[in-house]
Image (cartoon, rainbow, N blue to C red):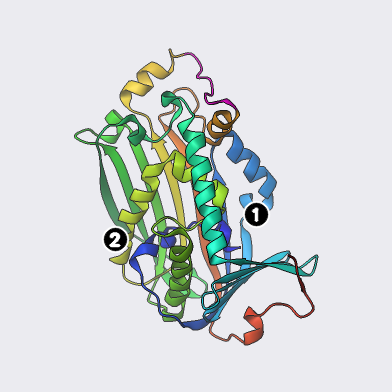
Amino acid sequence: MSRYRLAASTAIAVLITASSLFADIKMQEKTTFQMGGAMGGLINKLAGDAAKDGLVSTVAVRGSRKMTSTDASGRIIDLAEEKVYDIDYRKKEYRVTTFAELRKKWQDAQEKAKKDVDDMKADEKPDPRQEGKQYEVSFDVKETGQKKTVAGHNTREVVVTVTMHEKGKKLEEGGGLVMTNDLWIAPRIAAMDESMEFDLKFAKAIYGNSIPSIDAAQMSMLLASYPSFKEMSEKMAVELKKLEGTMLASSSTLEAVKSAEQMATASSAPPASSGGGIAGRLAARMMPKPKPGEQKTKAFSSSTETMSLSTTVTDSDTALPAGFKEKK
């Protein structure tokens, strides 16, 4: 479902103002999301094949309503009603949540994640900006010349790399973060662009100028641990807007890079304990644990690929299933 989706295209949420009605479109897409660290490994294991092989979902947009569904569950987002309907196909029931309730859950999750990370010791915090140094962001946009067919459309490969490094130093010297986005772009598909705008309008309504969430708790921990990720994503959005066409497939990776000083002291330093009690230890488990001698550590990786596209959509494609009962 869409809550697992964290493709590069979602980063342009704050830069798009969508209309109230959207072009009809129906598609199938496959998404993956994996976090680093011990807790990330547990989450990935619980997700099973969805984390390893990707989760295939059917998406339909009609007017101000969108349905995303798998065999087991579904979600209807209604922008006009400002409500979300989460559907359990096995139990034949659904739950209704308002946008206001979702915003509150997101804020609560952010506060909890921030507290967990604040309780960690300084040397356990993975984001370089948490050290109080000055950092700058640089971009590299590369047209690789590679081509492939995605959902029946010809696409070209563009790699957008966003690097945050200490001011006046190279990445390998001062450390930092690297976000790599591998994009496959087709000539403009209007209906597909409007489907993305639907997602972005919903994301902005719930998360404001933050990043759309795959899962509120996981994303909150990611943003609390790597606050620079939000800034990098928003700045990357500017670069993405310059690209012509419609993204049909993308993959993103965020890596933390140790400084030369950190590399020199890592081997001699005793293992760091997890501070801050249970909350601090939980936050520490969410962080990726680099192997000795490794300068780069993967924080997360995600991908989204469109498998099929159609502009034939009926009201039933975005409606609640007949006979299902609301769960209060």
- Give the residue pinned by disc 1: 50
Residue 248 seen in render: no
The part of the image, by quadrant, that contains residue 14 is bottom left
- Give the residue pinned by disc 2: 238
Give the residue at x 44% y 80%: 20
The part of the image, by quadrant, that contains residue 88 is bottom right
Provide the residue span drawn in magenta: 270-277
Q: Does dot 2 land on a helix, a strand or a loop?
A: helix
Left or right side of 157 for 279: right
Give the residue at x 28% y 51%: 140
Task: Give me the disc on residue 63.
Answer: none
Give the residue at x 43% y 44%: 254
Please, is residue 50 above or below residue 94 in the view?
above
Amino acid tagged 1: Ala
Amino acid tagged 2: Val
Q: Does dot 1 land on a helix, a strand or a loop?
A: helix
Left or right side of 232 for 317: right
Please, is residue 143 above or below residue 265 in the view?
below
Quadrant of the image containing the N terminus: bottom right
Counting from the top left corner in percent of width and height, residue 175 is at: 32, 32
Quadrant of the image containing the C terminus: bottom right
Please, is residue 48 above or below residue 193 in the view?
above
Is residue 271 magenta-colored?
Answer: yes
Counting from the top left corner in percent of width and height, residue 212 is at: 47, 58
Left or right side of 144 for 123: right
